[in-house]
Amino acid sequence: MATPFFLRIGATALTDMPVTFCFVLTLYCTVRLSQAPTYRLAIITGLCLGAGLLCKYTMIFIYPLLLGMCIIQGALRRLLPYLGVVVLVSGSVLAVWLGYTAAVGILTAQRDTLASHTRFASMTNGGLRWKVGTSLLGLPSGLGTYSLPLLVVGGRRLLQRKSQADLLVLLWIGAVFVPLVLTLPGPRYFLPAFPALALMMACGLGRVGEAAGRLILVALLYCGGALYLFVDWYRQVHSLFV
């Protein structure tokens, strides 16, 4: 709740928040699947994953995350048949949608748009300016620069403890951030990793003891100020924040 993007993007008619919901729900179902594996739960997990794929392509980052989760838990061999069902069901959902869009001509209509975006991202001047703006302005403003110290403290604590849960949080962040940092389509595309960043910040709050409540209050107040700027500020560099 202290990250401006969570509230700002959550109130817009975009697919970023639904894909974040599906991302977290799929992770939750996978955790339940690792505890008590059943093919029924594997089908439900696959449907959740498939729904996320229909929302946004960033949902594909969850596949290596699920694999890494099973490896960290030492349950890959036991869960491999169920993961196969998850992949089959989610892939079937996506295949049905792609078949429909190809039949009605949506894919063909989007071809030129996707090609233009690809050309822009690879341009020396425009693409580089976009990537620098996303890294230095867009993403930090979405997270809230006031959150960065807690992220640093929390990340250091996770690396020190290295429990299964800590490694899962780090893997979650890496599975989303690494491919997106290489392409940088836009700061809001990082939203599926925001819950993991919140867990990292919560871990950092655990190091400050009784001051945690005051820090949360300050972060919420800063978030309110950031949201006011988002609404009231005339942004000439609009593309850097969208």
Image (spheres, rainbow, N blue to C red):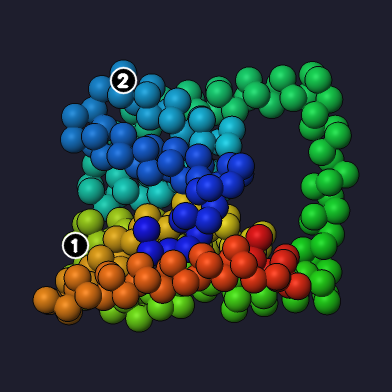
Q: What is the spatial separation of the Cα atoms under label 2 and label 1, in whole angstroms? A: 28 Å
User: In the rendered image, which residue does mark 2 sit on?
Assistant: 39
Residue at image coords 85%, 32%: 108
Residue at image coords 58%, 37%: 55
Residue 170, position as x, y percentages in the image = 35, 63
Residue at image coords 79%, 19%: 103
**In terms of depth relative to the viewer, which is nearer, 226 or 187?**
226
**Image position of 18 with respect to 172: above or below:** above
Q: Residue furthest front?
A: 232
Residue 226, position as x, y percentages in the image = 50, 70
**In terms of depth relative to the viewer, which is nearer, 22 or 59?**
22
Please tell me whether mark 1 sits on a helix, a strand or a loop.
loop
Q: Which mark is residue 171?
A: none
User: In the rendered image, which residue does mark 1 sit on?
Assistant: 163
Tally the marks. 2
Residue flagged by tag 1: what amino acid is it?
A: Ser
Crowd around label 2: few <14 · some 14–19 · many ≥20 (10 Å): some
Please tell me whether mark 2 sits on a helix, a strand or a loop.
helix
